Amino acid sequence: MTKGRRVKESEGLRANDLTGEGEYLVPDVLEHGLTLVLVGTAPSKISAARRAYYANPSNKFWRTLHQAGLTPRQLAPSEYPLLPSFGLGLTDVAKRHSGVDATLPREAWQPEELRAKVRQYQPKLLAFTSKRGAAETLGVSTGKLTYGPQTETLEGAEVWVLPSTSPLGHNYFQLEPWEALGKRVKELQQG
């Protein structure tokens, strides 16, 4: 694949694979002018197999986006290429590996690659969908991170940390930080 070539998704939607080599398990959804980029850790085995973000039916991600007011309706995982039309993008800290965070090898984490993407696309907000992805990128322990907005920026973008929507984190999930993010995104989009 050459840079800019599009990858066909299962439902006829398209999304750029920005590696130029087809090496990402799930393509980035990034472009200039986005209000918010949501950053996962790595695709689950189900998401990698389907080449769609948060494709595990037990994952609350798509329902949570809608409940938080970030999308006008609940999208299906295969509809992830629609997110830029709402000012949203998607990527992961570990783009070339799949599975549970705790099983990812050390080399899976690519925080400098993520930083380069943030510099290139310059979103206003960057929200990590788990403490682990934030910790790997920001260089702090998960115990020192709180949910919600952080005091530091990343390459000029406001940083948020959100509770994971993964089935493994259902007992710890809280909707309130997601709703606060939804309000902040609306402020920036209307401002």
Image: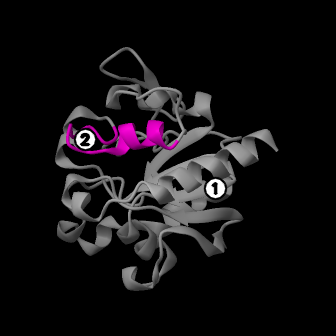
- Residue 104 percent coordinates (x, y): 22, 66
- Residue 95 percent coordinates (x, y): 36, 53
Question: At numbered mark 1, what does the secondary structure look like: helix, strand or loop?
Answer: strand
Q: What stretch is highlighted in magenta?
A: 53-68
**Sequence-first tag of 1 and 2:** 2
Note whether residue 137 is visible: yes
| Above or below for 60 versus 114 | above
| Residue 47 tag number | 2
The type of colouring in the image is one colour
Q: In which quarter of the image is the N terminus?
A: top left
Q: In which quarter of the image is the C terminus?
A: top right
Mark 2 Cα-neighbour bin, 10 Å: few <14, some 14–19, many ≥20? many
Q: Is 179 contained in the magenta span?
A: no
- Residue 155 percent coordinates (x, y): 67, 66
Are circles 1 and 2 on residues that touch, CB within 8 Å? no
Horizontal side, residue 119 vs residue 48: left or right:
right
- Residue 36 percent coordinates (x, y): 60, 48
Instruction: State the residue at coordinates (32%, 35%).
Output: 52
Q: What residue type is labelled 1?
A: Leu
Q: What residue type is labelled 2?
A: Ser
Instruction: State the residue at coordinates (35%, 23%).
Output: 9
| Above or below for 36 versus 161 | above
Question: At numbered mark 2, what does the secondary structure look like: helix, strand or loop?
Answer: helix
Query: Mark 1 highlights which residue?
Result: 125
